[in-house]
């Protein structure tokens, strides 16, 4: 009897080593840029919120008309107002963009604010390729003037206004809160406060930085204008309540901008100052989970509500 034949196993195909993908991971700068209009997500709008898009609020001689978008709640008017100021290094950006971590929200962030009973105005301002400082701040003052002029028609109470900005918009929101009398409060996300001193990646000598393009020259060449554009040096006793939130790992706007401004406000202002530094967060809340971004937004909205319902608001609970 022949011995049984053991079948020869088929030859194993060698697996080539995994090849590295040639696709470049997006940088923080890539992520924070506003999406192209061709593929930007459409906002989810609750039925309780009305929108007015592209409403002109100012004419600039020789320039484009300046416009704002409005989200209006279906609540008894006049409604308190949140004036939102977008980011983009003063060079780019879109008025209806609160940052890349909120772009996928449905309802979107402005619809959420309106659903809480606020009117929301998202205003254009001239970018640094169009005009240098103080043009963007002048534009925000013009937006406040127009909202006051047309407030009765809109059902908006500009006398109860909180300004809210992120990044470059946070810088402008701080300036507006410190130069426009009567604002109820300011919410500032990772905004520059000092254009005179080297902090993080910012240098004073380089004429090509976003800060220099805003000013019209390197801060070392324009020290007076750099100081005038720095909220840190405009703090005064009548400043409104401030909420400053900043990522501790911010690689674009150093966290010291917010800690320094908070210290100056606490020393000088009679109003409350709430500072929240977020561990592990890079610019635009890059690097932290969605729950943290939601907590930052909810805390900001609660702070705005406290500003409008109290003459001496306390920070809303403690930071999550």
Image: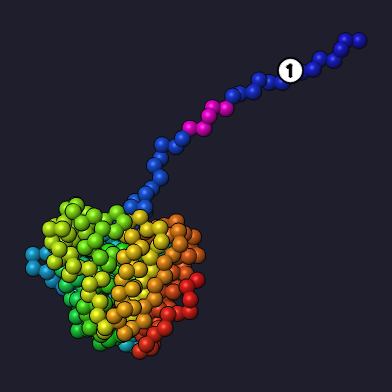
The spot of residue 236 in percent (x, y) is 24, 80
Q: Residue at x 52, y 32 (%)?
A: 18
**Residue 78, picture quadrant:** bottom left
Q: Is residue 148 above or below residue 52?
A: below
Residue in front for this viewpoint, 257 or 66? 257
Q: Residue at x 24, y 55 (%)?
A: 203
Q: Residue furthest right?
A: 1
Secondary structure beneath label 1 = loop
Pointer 1: residues within 10 angstroms few (<14), some, or many (20+)?
few
Q: Residue furthest front?
A: 267
Provide the major secondary structure of the magenta segment: loop
Residue 162 falls within the magenta-colored stretch: no
Q: Residue at x 36, y 78 (%)?
A: 273
Can I make out residue 116 in this image?
no
Residue in front for this viewpoint, 243 or 29? 243
Q: Residue furthest top?
A: 1
Which quarter of the rendered picture does the N terminus lie within? top right
Can I make out residue 268 in this image?
yes
Q: Which residues are magenta?
A: 15-19
Q: How is the image coloured?
A: rainbow
Residue in front for this viewpoint, 319 or 136? 319
Q: Residue at x 41, y 36 (%)?
A: 22
Q: How many marks?
A: 1
The spot of residue 66 in percent (x, y) is 18, 69
Residue corresponding to mark 1: 8
The spot of residue 319 in percent (x, y) is 47, 73
Q: Is residue 213 above or below residue 17?
A: below
Q: Is residue 5 above or below residue 25?
A: above
**Residue 256, picture quadrant:** bottom left
Residue 18 falls within the magenta-colored stretch: yes
The spot of residue 238 in percent (x, y) is 26, 84
């Amino acid at each position: 009897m022949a011995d049984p034949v053991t079948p020869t196993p088929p030859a194993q195909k060698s697996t080539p080593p995994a090849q590295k993908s040639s696709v470049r991971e997006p940088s923080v700068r890539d992520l924070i840029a506003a999406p192209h209009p061709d593929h930007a997500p459409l906002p989810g709008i609750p039925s309780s919120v009305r929108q007015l898009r592209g409403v002109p609020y100012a004419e600039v001689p020789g320039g484009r008309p300046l416009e704002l978008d409005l989200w209006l709640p279906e609540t008894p008017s006049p409604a308190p107002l949140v004036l939102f100021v977008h980011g983009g290094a003063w060079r780019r950006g879109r008025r209806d963009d609160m940052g890349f971590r909120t772009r996928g929200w449905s309802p979107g962030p402005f619809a959420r604010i309106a659903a809480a009973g606020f009117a929301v105005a998202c205003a254009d301002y001239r970018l640094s390729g169009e005009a240098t400082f103080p043009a963007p701040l002048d534009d925000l003052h013009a937006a406040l003037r127009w909202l006051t002029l047309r407030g009765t028609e809109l059902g908006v109470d500009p006398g109860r206004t909180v300004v809210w900005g992120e990044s470059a918009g946070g810088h402008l929101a701080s300036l507006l809160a410190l130069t426009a009398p009567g604002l109820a409060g300011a919410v500032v996300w990772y905004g520059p406060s000092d254009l005179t001193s080297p902090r993080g990646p910012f240098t004073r000598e380089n004429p090509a930085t976003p800060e220099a393009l805003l000013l019209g020259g390197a801060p070392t060449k324009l020290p007076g204008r750099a100081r005038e554009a720095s909220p840190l040096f405009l703090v005064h006793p009548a400043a409104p309540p401030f909420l400053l939130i900043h990522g501790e790992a911010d690689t674009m706007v150093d966290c010291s901008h917010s800690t320094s401004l908070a210290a100056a406000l606490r020393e000088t202002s009679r109003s409350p100052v709430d500072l929240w530094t977020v561990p592990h967060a890079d610019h635009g809340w890059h690097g932290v989970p969605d729950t943290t971004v939601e907590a930052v937004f909810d805390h900001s909205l609660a702070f705005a509500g406290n500003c409008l319902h109290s003459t001496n608001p306390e920070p809303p609970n403690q930071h999550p």
